[in-house]
Amino acid sequence: MNKRIVREITPITKDDFFIVLNHFNAKFDFPVHYHPEYELNLVLYSSGKRIVGDSIKNYQNTDLVLVGPNTPHAWTGEQEGGVRVITIQFQSDLLGEHILSRKLTLPIKELLERSKAGVLFSEETTAVMADRILKLTQTRGFDSLLDFLSILYDLSISRNQLNLSSLSYVGQFDTSKSRRIKMVNHYLYENFSNPVRIEDVARLVNMSPSAFSHFFKKRTQRSFTDYLTELRIGHAARLLIETEKNISEICFESGFNNISNFNRSFKMQKGCTPSEFRSQQTLITKF
């Protein structure tokens, strides 16, 4: 696996319907990454390359793509003149199977299924939807959820959609079917704020530490240490967004044992320091 493909821990929590990340003057400096959430990405006023799975294509001026769970993706682009990126992330259970299976919502179900390979929307659809997506960055309350569902439905019935990646490629990043990975994830989410030893985690799934280390890296494309660090950084990012706790408190609550290590790891993962990240938190809206 390409070591540059990283698993992102997103700021969304189980209590959120979706989150909107509003990037002004986007730098396009995040590496190719994947995460278990869906992502609708609108790029404005830029041109560059779009990477979704094994598809690497140029885009011009505007780009609107729905990326499914665990599908690697990234955008590169010019950074001059007011580039703006709106990213909407939502979890796979936003609408339950019992709702998606109804006749009225079947188009949404089919769109979400196709999004595993990435869905590129036409220029005509993007032109119509851009203003509605921008408006979503300013709305609040229950109406914002209705507006978002309406956007999803209209996208699902739009014409000239294009799948970007081969499903055989993106499927290899889906760890949800591994019983052992599920057990490890559950354990880590319960214990990441405390010292975690690989020996204890390996014992949990009846493996030796060396065998577990090899198995874990093969299934997640990350070393166990890197994965745990990313989980802790993701939790810290959520606390920086949602609470007024000071950075020292957040450092230790997220499982780091000193501030310098926390700052270094955070900047490596997020491209900025915790304090810089907090100063940008107004650009993230949760619903």
Image (cartoon, rainbow, N blue to C red):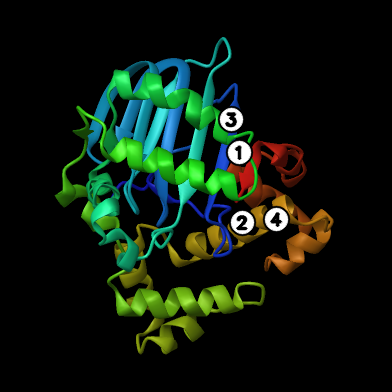
Numbered disc total: 4
Residue 196 shows up from this direction = no
Name the kind of residue labelled 2 in the image.
Ile
- Residue 124: which quarter of the image? top left
Mark 1–mark 3 CB contact (< 8 Å): no
- Mark 3 to mark 4: distance in Å? 24 Å
Which residue has dot 1 on it?
271
User: Is 223 located above or below residue 44 in the figure?
Assistant: below
Image location (x, y in percent) of residue 53: 26, 41
Which residue has dot 4 on it?
262
Apparent side of residue 159 relative to residue 188 in the rendered image (left or right): left
Q: Residue at horizontal 50%, vertical 59%? A: 226
Name the kind of residue labelled 1 in the image.
Gly
Which residue has dot 2 on it?
233
Q: Residue at horizontal 81%, vertical 63%? A: 249
Name the kind of residue labelled 4 in the image.
Phe
Image location (x, y in percent) of residue 66: 34, 39
Image location (x, y in percent) of residue 247: 80, 54
- Residue 64: which quarter of the image? top left
